[in-house]
Amino acid sequence: MNDDIKPQPQPVNSTPNAAELTLVTPHTLLLIITQCPTVEVADAISAALLNHRLAACVTRLPPVISNYLWQGEFCQSEEYPLHIKTSAQHFTAISQTICQLHPYEVPEIIALPIMAAHLPYQQWILQSCSN
């Protein structure tokens, strides 16, 4: 094990709040993932995010089959994943936009920090998402 990389102690009984992204700065790049039930919903979310300059790019993937538990029942649905490339400063606005346009009671909204990326691509994302 490399001595330079040490596990960070985790606070006991600490639940992360969706609004607090403590590991990122406002200019940290994020890949936000959500699943949509139809192409129309996916395209509406994509258009809203791009029109409001909340994302630099939204990639709609081919449909996938999601298996999940909802209210204690096993469910299976065809869904269209969206990969949203943005900066952390827009996470809350993107989450709100998805919730407004999405028919699910609890839509999947997951943000992953982009740990490394081609420098010109990073700059393009930040420029595209600036107001």
Image (spheres, helix red, strand yellow):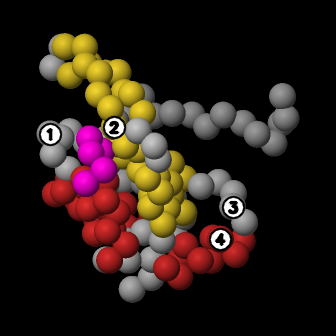
The range drawn in magenta is: 36-40
Name the mark nearer the viewer: 2 or 3: 2
Q: Amino acid at mark 1?
A: Glu
Task: Point out which mark residue 121 bears.
Answer: 4
Q: Are marks 2 and 1 in contact (CB under 8 Å)?
A: no
Query: Mark 2 or 3 closer to N-term?
Result: 2
Up-down relation of residue 67 to residue 5 (above or below)? above
Q: Is residue 59 visible?
A: yes
Q: Are marks 1 and 4 in contact (CB under 8 Å)?
A: no
Task: Residue at 36%, 27% (x, y): give it.
Answer: 66
Q: Amino acid at mark 3?
A: Ala
Q: Amino acid at mark 2?
A: Glu
Task: Point out which mark residue 105 bears.
Answer: 1
On the picture, is 76 further left or further right than 4? left
- Give residue 94's position: percent from left, percent from top: 31, 62
Task: Point out which mark residue 117 bears.
Answer: 3
Q: Are marks 4 and 3 in contact (CB under 8 Å)?
A: yes
Q: Is residue 32 visible?
A: no
Query: Mark 1 or 3 closer to N-term?
Result: 1
Query: Mark 4 or 2 closer to N-term?
Result: 2
Residue bearing the label numbered 2: 79
- Give residue 35's position: percent from left, percent from top: 34, 42
Q: Secondary structure at mark 3?
A: loop
Q: Residues within 10 Å of mark 4 (few under 14, many from 20)?
A: few
Task: Residue at 72%, 71% (x, y): give it.
Answer: 119
Query: Which quadrant of the figure contains the C terminus?
Result: bottom left
Name the mark nearer the viewer: 2 or 1: 2
Q: Secondary structure at mark 1?
A: loop
Query: Mark 2 or 1 closer to N-term?
Result: 2
Task: Residue at 57%, 34% (x, y): give it.
Answer: 9
